[in-house]
Image (cartoon, rainbow, N blue to C red):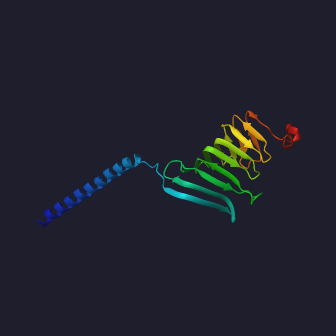
Amino acid sequence: MNFIKEIVYKNIAGFFSCAIFFAFISCDEDLAKINKNRNTNFPSQIINNANIIQRDSGMIKLRATAPLIEKYEYVDSPYIVARKGINILFYDKKKPTEPGKISAKYAKFNEKKKFYEAKGNVKIISNEKQMFAMQSVYWDQVKKVIYTTDTVYVTDKDGSTLVGANGMRAKDDFSEYTFYNNSGDINAQKIPEKDR
């Protein structure tokens, strides 16, 4: 009789073990299906009234202020977005007391590609006091190039103006730039002899 009870208990234990095993497997499959359909496009971090300071070796490189900054890090290509506008002061090692300025109604930074975009009444003022105005601009940090296909209005500190009707391409430190289909008043003495 003990022998039959032992066999029954072993069968019950085996049955429950199999049932639990199959229950876990079916749950894993369901979780995989659920996670596949899960929305990950939501901000993981939200900063209201942001005031960000970036330093390098103790020196301030950048100051950014924005009413709202959202960071999306659970997507395939993580990014940071400032939907309500942004103002940035950037400092150059050559002129650490004269910051350049960027302002836009919208900005986005793709962290993997190191690619920035700014849209909506974009204004860039270099530390040389040149003002660039356009509707959108893109900065590829890897290639160290800033470009746009929008019309660019440039005003120099002496009041001369230049219009690049089909955009521009520049080094990210604005040491060199090219305008496409340009016109305007510019001081000819600023142009090197070989380019006149």
Looking at the picture, tell me which residue is in the foreground, 108 or 29.
108
How far across and how far down the image is residue 142, in percent? 66, 48
Q: How many marks?
A: 0
34 left or right, relative to 195: left
Res 9 → quadrant: bottom left
16 left or right, relative to 153: left
Residue at 29 percent across and 55 percent down: it is: 21
Give the answer, above or below, for where 128 lies relative to 195: below
How far across and how far down the image is residue 160, in percent? 79, 42
Residue projecting furthest to the front: 159
106 left or right, relative to 34: right
Res 192 → quadrant: top right
Give the answer, above or below, for where 134 lies relative to 84: above
Looking at the picture, tell me which residue is in the foreground, 57 or 183.
183
User: Where the N terminus falls, by quadrant?
Assistant: bottom left
Residue at 80 percent across and 46 percent down: it is: 158
Residue projecting furthest to the left: 1
How far across and how far down the image is residue 136, in percent? 63, 42
Residue at 62 percent across and 53 percent down: it is: 87
Residue projecting furthest to the top: 181
User: Where the C terminus falls, by quadrant?
Assistant: top right
Looking at the picture, tell me which residue is in the foreground, 13 or 5.
13
Residue at 55 percent across and 50 percent down: it is: 84
